[in-house]
Amino acid sequence: MAWRLLAKPFRLLGTTRAFSNTVDGGIKGPSMKTAVPGPKTKELIAEMDEITQSSMASVFVDFDKSKGNYLVDVDGNVILDTFCQISSLPLGYNHDAITEAVSKKENLMGLVNRSSIMMFPPKDFVQKMKSSLLMCAPPGMSQVTAMMCGSCANENAIKAAFIWYMDKKRGNANIGPDSEEFSTALYNKPPGCPDLSVLSFDGAFHGRTIGVLSATHSKPIHKLDIPAFDWPIAPFPQLKYPLEDHVTENKAEEQRCLQRVTELIDEYNAKQKFVAAAIIEPIQAEGGDNHASPEFFKGLRKICRDKGVAFIVDEVQTGVGTTGHMWAHEAWQLDDPPELVTFAKKMQLGGYYHTNDCKPRHSYRIFNTWMGDPARLALAEVIVKEIKENDLVKNAKEVGDVFLGGLKDLENKYPQLLLKARGSGTFCAIDCKTAAAKDTLVTAVRNKGVYVGVSGDCTIRFRPALIFQRQHAELTLEVIESVLKEL
Ligand SMILES: Cc1ncc(COP(=O)(O)O)c(C=O)c1O
């Protein structure tokens, strides 16, 4: 990560303890009054169902009372939250700096007058972009385009890649599209709407809107009944754990997947469905917390470069510090930056960083009424500042190491129940033997006051806020162990 435009060096807080004493606002630990969901949540779910789909609702939250790492639900249960609104809370609940920023008049203006930001930018727009999104841009990237959510960040990054690809194909940046391209484009026909494709990976999740759904392959229910593009799908490495005991096999597995990527690009190019981009998550999240090595990603980057394919790194879930790097792909130490890096979740607004040549030359090719949001940009500014001043990326790395060590200990102690402890920073996961065992464990842990997430079929995933401390990690491990003992 290249911290930009920074006037002052880091201000480190005196000790970790000083920080942790304040983040949870006096909440000392979980305290449970009912099972989860409790009776009040159940009542509200029933009411909700009368007006909209309620089947995804897990707990109704009392956001007033929630603080730091603790979610308080409407039944008065105080729950240590290691899932944090599907990995989207950077600083936990009701963080003082965010509350303060929201109450500032200049930031309130963004709420009162939501601007169509690219056409009518607020007067401080450029400064705000520089002090938020660009302040923490990935290495080598100086351009950013704001969007609303993760899916729409990926949709538009893919569009930018298509435009980039066709510009290159036309050969000369000054030669624009010809009249045939314009006349066919309106009717969904080539050459105006060319038959381009995007390579994605088995188990990937890039969102649920119609375009990116063709690159999402984590659960069939997400895709059912929705028409899809014929785009290439490469295998994602299935690594064996513990990694240190399977070095040779895992290397061969990654080579197999890279070989298949090359073959697929050649196959699709040969059938005139030219591969314009490859999109990948640094750690497959929704698909079951699947990891691959930096060498794999470097190999993929090289294939993309050699074949003229845009390399899109989807950091919607891995981005903003949680893996122990501001951007997870920094761990790969690439020679040249990806063409596009997408983000959302912890940044509070979506968007993508991109290289200069991924900026379209014509207006309105990438455009929405709302692209980002001035109010959310003001929050992103505070978040980036807090991360920096409190060294929260380092915190995620250090606490993550402790946490992963604890998960590995549990795996060694309960090998009949747990396997594949893995993670980077606090972006950790562990598998159960079966989906049913995972459900039992997750429910019991929740009822003891720790909310954990799930991914894939058998995986428990942890996505705490960046203010997650060693004592929160230890508490989580203790609660999980107390349940394992009873199983
Ligand atoms: C890696 C990744 N990409 C894209 C998305 C879609 O983001 P959103 O739900 O904001 O549309 C998600 C959401 O979980 C994600 O994890």
Image (tube, helix red, strand yellow):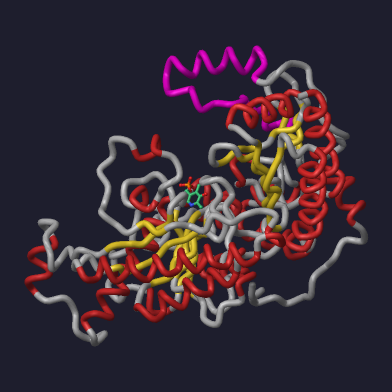
Q: Number of labelled discs?
A: 0
**Helix, strand or loop for the magenta stretch, by majority:** loop
Above or below, comparing residue 178 to residue 190 in the picture: below
First to last magenta residue range: 37-66
Name the residue: 12% across, 64% down.
190
Name the residue: 75% across, 32% down.
450
Residue 381 percent location from the top left of the image: 63, 60
Residue 143 percent location from the top left of the image: 48, 73
Q: Is residue 405 rendered magenta in the image?
A: no
In the depicted view, which residue is nearer to us: 406 or 411? 411
Residue 312 percent location from the top left of the image: 44, 66
Can residue 322 be seen?
Answer: yes
In the depicted view, which residue is nearer to us: 231 or 2? 231
- The quarter holding residue 31 reads top right
Q: Is residue 353 left or right of residue 268?
A: right
In the depicted view, which residue is nearer to us: 470 or 91? 470
Quadrant of the snapshot with the C terminus:
top right
In the depicted view, which residue is nearer to us: 382 or 73? 73
Q: Is residue 57 rendered magenta in the image?
A: yes
Can residue 378 be seen?
Answer: no
Quadrant of the snapshot with the N terminus:
bottom right
Above or below, comparing residue 110 to residue 190 in the picture: above
Residue 64 percent location from the top left of the image: 70, 31
